[in-house]
Image (spheres, rainbow, N blue to C red):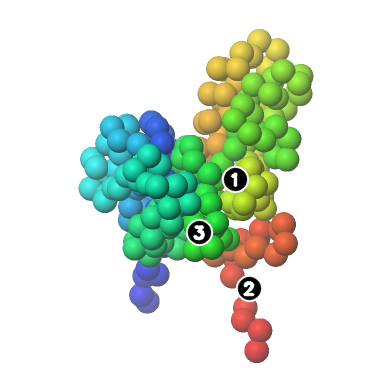
Amino acid sequence: MSTPTPARLVVLVSGAGTNLQALIDATADPAYGARVVAVGADRDDIVGLARAERAGIPTFVKKVGQFSSRDHWDRAMAETVAGFEPDLVVSAGFMKLAGESFLERFGGRFVNTHPALLPSFPGMHGAADALAYGVKVTGATLFIVDAGVDTGPIVDQVVVPVEAEDSVETLHERIKAAERQMLVDCVGRMAREGWTVTGRTVQFGRRPAVP
């Protein structure tokens, strides 16, 4: 019986790359069903790139300032990522929004995480906004990226209780730990089982072809 070919992952980072490291560690097990074939970034000299290099994974950097426009940068990112023939593109702390060219290439197979239970508390300060609002639970969301800000179809969510003594920092750290595990679990399932997106519903598993 032949072993299925691992799904190809391109991971995009902007900082420390802790989610990237979790994926690298997971892909060391052949049963996980995926491998990271490239890591891209929008800046030099970040820990995330160093993690990839230590693992022998090809890296690339595309800075917005190197291009004549944001659209030019977006097209260049799309071309470079496409060159690695990914089955799935993973934003792992990548701090740039995908543009039209990128989404045309990778729509439906580009995922990102957010440190809140979407559609609540979108944007840059999910943990702080949840704490300020006084919610009793928050969490993390994995979603398919679309043209909006944290508005794409939801793949999975995990709940994190808000403790009475929480600061933004302590709450965010617990969310990040839950987010990391959810990302690893779901990317593995997407790699092994496939997925479909119908409207706003994401389901694991490939549907049989219609005769």
Q: Secondary structure at mark 3?
A: helix
Residue at image location 64% in from the left, 14% down from the top? 166
The label number, if any, that marks residue 76 in the structure image: none
Left or right of 119 in this view: 25: left
Residue 184 visible, this angle: no
Q: Residue at x 53, y 23 (%)?
A: 173
- Name the kind of residue labelled 2 in the image: Arg
Residue 59 seen? yes
User: Badge 1 is on which residue?
Assistant: 142
Amino acid type at image mark 3: Ser
Q: Is residue 143 left or right of residue 90?
A: right
Image quarter (top left, top right, bottom left or bottom right) of the N terminus: bottom left
Q: Which residue lies at the image location 71% right of the left edge and 58% below the top edge?
A: 201
Residues at circles 3 and 1 in contact by the CB criterion of under 8 Å: no
Residue 109 relative to residue 3: left or right? right
Q: Is residue 162 above or below residue 29?
A: above
**Direction front: furthest residue:** 68
Q: How many marks?
A: 3
- Say what amino acid the circle numbered 1 marks: Leu
* Residue 140 placement (x, y as % from top left): 62, 36
Up the image or down, 85 lies above or below 57; here it is below
Percent position (x, y) of residue 18?
41, 34
- How packed mark 3 is, by other alpha carbons closer than 10 Å (few <14, some 14-19, many 20 or more), is some
Which residue bears the numbered disc 3?
101
Q: Is residue 193 above or below residue 136?
A: below
